[in-house]
Structure formats: C-alpha cells, structure tokens
Image: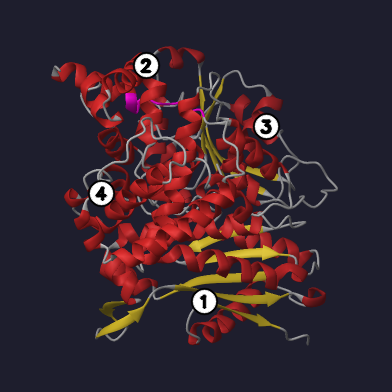
Amino acid sequence: MLHQSHLLEESPARSDRCLFNPFVRGMLITQDDALAELFHSLAPTERMQWERFVSTVGAMERLFTDPPDILVVDDTLEDGTGARFVNIIKSENVYRKLPVVLCLNRDELQGGLLWNQVEADDFLLKPLDPAETASRISIALNRSVRSLDANPLSNLPGNTSIIQRIQELVDMGREFALLYCDLDHFKSYNDKYGFIRGDEVLMMTSRVIVNTVRSMGLEYSFVGHVGGDDYVCIVPMARAEEACRRIIANFDPILPSFYDPEDRDRGTILAEDRRGEKQNVPLMSISIAVVMNHGGKIRHYGAAAYAASQLKKLAKEKEGSVYVIDQRLS
Amino acid sequence: MTDDLHIERKDRILQVSDLPTLPTALEEVSRLVEDPSSSTDQIAKVIAYDQVLSAKILKMVNSPIYGFPGRIGSISHALVLLGFNVIKGVIVSTSVFDTMNKSMAGLWEHSVGCALACAEVAKTARLKDPEEYSVCGLLHDLGKVVAAVQLPDLKTEIDRRVAEDDLTYREAEQLVLGFDHERINAWLADHWHLPLMIREGMSRHHTPLRAQHFPAAACVVHVGDFLVRLFEYGSGGDDNVPELEPKALRLLKIGGAELERTMDALSEKLIDVASVSFA
C-alpha cells in the first residue's frame, strides 16, 4: 500500500506507551464470563471500556444507534448466530468500517470457515492469551483506520486521516502549510468522457501530487484525498510555494494526454456548463489554495478548512493552473 | 507454418519477463536514482537513449494498476507518474545482456538514431509533441530484441539467412519465425497497454499506408528509419536501406527541399551522439 509512506513525518513522541490511544469503546457479545473478564482486564478503564451483551438480540439495537469502535463476537453462541450477526452489520455501508473480531474454538477452523462469507476482520482462538488479545485488538483498530479510511480510488488517506493529521499539528501548535488542490472543469470532462475516464484523471492527479511532494525531500509531508477531485497536502511553510509550483509544472504537461486528439488540439471541449448550456470549456487545470498556520494561530481543523475553501474560490476565478496563498499574519 | 506453432511462438514472446539491456544507460540511470539531487528530467534524458528501459518504463506506467492504461507515451511524464521508488524498482530488476554480440550494440545505436530522425521529421512536418514521435522511433525495432531474447535459436537462424541468402532482416524473420518484428511490436504494444499512437508507430513503420488511427506516426517512423539507415548509423540487423514509400512523405507534406534540410539537421544530431558508446 502507498499508505504509510505518505506519513513521512515522525509521529510525535507519546509519553505513555499504551496500545490504546485514543480511548477505545468496545462491544463484546459472549455468554462466557471468563472471556468477558479477560477483555475487561486488557487495559485500564480510562483507556478502554467494554460493553458486554450475552446475546445478539440486545446488542443489535445498541449497535445501530451507537456503534462502538470495535466489536468482538464470541461465535460459540448458539448455532452460528455470531457469524450471521456480523454479516448483517457488515452489509450496511454505515457500519462497514467497524472492525469485527470473532472468538473461535480451534475445532471450528477444522471445518473450514469460509472467510469470504463471514465478513470478520480477524479472529482469536480460545482459550485467549491476554497479551496476544490486546495486540490483536489494537492492530484491528489501527488497520481499520488505515485501510477503510483510504479513498477507494486512489488508496490515499481520506477525510478521517486528514482531519486527524491537521488536528494533531494544530494541537502541537506547529507551523505548517495546508495545500488544498482541486481540478477546474473536471465536471465537464466527466460529463463528456464518462466517469471511467474521469477516474483516470483522478488517479493521474494523485500520482502527480504524491510524487511531487515526495521528491522534495521535506522534513515532513502528508497527502490525502478528500474525495472526487479534491486533494490535501501538508508541507512545511517554507517550502509551500515551491510545492505548488512543482505540482503545477508536473500536472500541466501531462494532462492533455487524457483528452482525445481533436479536443487536445482545439484546447477546449464542448460540454454543458453548470447552467446546462453547451459551452466551449477549457482543458482542465489545477487550482491550489494554501493556508499557512503562522505561529500556530489556527486553533481548530475547521478553521483551516474554512480558510481553504474561501481561498479556493479566489483560485477558481483565475484561468489555468494557479495557486493562491493566504498570507494573513493576524 | 502451423497455427499451433505460431501461437506457441507468440506466447513465448509475450512471456518476456526479463528484457536485458546494454550496460551504458543502465549504469548512468542507476547512478542518478541513487543521487537525491537528481531530477526526473535528468533521468528521462538518459532513459531516452535506451529502447529497453524506455519500453519498461512505459509498460509500467500504462499498466492497469495505475489506473490510466494506454494514456502515457512520454518518458518524462512516465517518470513523474511513477516516482523514484518505482523507477528504482525497474532499474534494479533490469539485467544486462551477458553475451554482447555486435548486432545488439548496432541495434541500440540504430534505435537511438531512429529516435533522433523521427524527432527531426516530426518537426519538419510541423507535428505537435515531437518527443512522442521519437519514442515511436526508439521502440520501432523492439520486437527484434524481444525475439532474440525469447527465441534465441531462431534469432541465430535469422542472422544466418540474412548473411547467406542476402535477405532483408524482415524477409528472414518471415521465413524463419512466420511473422516479422512489426507483428511482434503490435503484440507487445497491446499486451503492455501502450498508447495507440506508439503502437502504430511501432507496428506500421514498414507498412505506413496501412496505419488506421495514427498514420502520421507510422509515416514519421518509416521516414526516420529510412534516413538513419541512409546515414548508416548503427545497424537494424542487415545493411539494406529499406524502400521509401513516397506517399508517406506526401502524407506528411514534406517536399524534397524540406527532406534535404531534415537530413542536414539529422547529421548534426548524429555527430552529437557519436560519442555515446553502446557496447
């Protein structure tokens, strides 16, 4: 996966080396008291709390209204309701992200559980070992943040990671530059060429941004894919303008390859504009809005996002690939 | 030749996994990717002198895993999109011909010469993006390399026929293999999802009037191949100058005086690269 290599930055030193950070809310479904006891003892309650249910019936409603961070199902419930329960959860897009761990007896594996039909993320074999269980729970939580937050098209980290990363920097009072990139006239291209070719352009754009930022040898950087034609990069303030220039210099020459020869030669495509009227629309370009966190003045992720969206409007008004930098020092 | 044998040979050719190259460009690129101050432009300049490295890079960037197959025909664009990690991966997985015979070195020179010739012809014909035409020229004889690597016994036989029976390389290929390097180029271009323009340049340079989608690319490589053989720069495996299809020049709207000027410009370029050694 591309994924971790985007987080070139060293993680901030954590004073406490606990497996569970931030606080974790687990849900456990089991009839086995000893098993429940083991889960409760994995971590102090200020780090992790388990809500226990003895059957899937009561658990279902709780889960639908207030989903936990992780779900552990003891499949030695009666006649495989555990696996069925898991599949109901996993078939709903809203709950798909929820990591699910099954507790099994070794003999259940002999029968060959069909993992393509049981949508669990991991399993534990009984009798459970406390240290192994803690690690498996931790890895399941981390994996779900990493993989399910990834944009399905580009595999770049998505919104959750982006917000988390920005908030971390804000909390540390770090200076950084937030680059908000999006494509101009992408919608017209998508309408004319179809979404499959639209996706090609988004994949190309991901590669351009990631490789450009990576090749700069920055002390830290991050690239995320908000979705559609919106991307976010975090780079040191001193190199932000250079990053913008390089992204544009790499993007502009490659882009025309994604048009048919006649459109490329004309430099425009005939497509409907936002009002539904046929217009000659220019080839796509990339606009970058840059928010600088001078002196760590930004207190919250939302403020950074708002500033970026305001700047984006400015950048969008200009023809061609441009970047706009917010230099307000107030 | 039976159909079965034909299919079997085609399969052998498409199974090409290790396409070795000459040490020259490989060593230079290896040095550049290890140096953090290198730019993709510097690397692109070196890779543009090596048909095998260029083909590998284009094959890589156009593979479906990247999500835009058949779109990228420029080496410098490919390098931006692949990034240093992947370029390094391609470089370390490329080996060098262990038995370097003279004909291979000659083929590398001929390919580079053809790339330069195509760029000049494209400029004369006022075509956009001459770099894409030079890539067509660079790769126009790749099928010969792949056949030599995948079907070495037959390659020996082709060389023997060329030497003893006074055949062109292409005639000998058709006799020995049952198909020629144009056909192999078409198979490779399809198999590797190369852009259609490059496919036509590679697979129609001897038969430019049969190009359906990008006749200009086929005609440019046809003329470029003719010119570089005229100058006897490198070797395409035989010492014939192929016949020039006059309609190809007409299609490119290149007249006699312009062809003269193109040849002058090309001879300058060939003198510049004469110092590059391939063996």
Nearer the observer, disc 1 or disc 4? 4
Report the residue marked by disc 1.
Answer: A321
Nearer the observer, disc 3 or disc 4? 4
Q: Tell me the kind of residue under disc 3.
A: Ser
Marks 3/1: CA–CA distance: 47 Å
Callout 1–callout 4 Cβ contact below 8 Å: no
Q: Are labels 3 and 1 assigned to the same chain?
A: yes
Q: Are labels 1 and 2 assigned to the same chain?
A: no
| Pick the front one: B144 or B231 | B231
Report the residue marked by disc 3.
Answer: A135
Q: Tell me the kind of residue under disc 1.
A: Ser
Nearer the observer, disc 3 or disc 1? 1
Q: Judging from the image, what secondary structure is the residue with disc 3 in?
A: helix
| Pick the front one: B183 or A97 | B183
Report the residue marked by disc 4.
Answer: B244
Q: How many residues crowd around disc 3 within 10 Å: few (fewer than 14), some, or many (20 or more)? A: some
Q: Chain of mark 2?
A: B
User: Where does the image place residue A20, in percent across and percent down from the top left?
Assistant: 71, 43
Q: Judging from the image, what secondary structure is the residue with disc 4 in?
A: loop
User: Where does the image place residue A259, in percent across and percent down from the top left?
Assistant: 33, 65
Q: In the rendered image of this protein, does residue A90 appear above or below residue A210? A: above
Q: Tell me the kind of residue under disc 4.
A: Leu
Marks 2/4: CA–CA distance: 28 Å
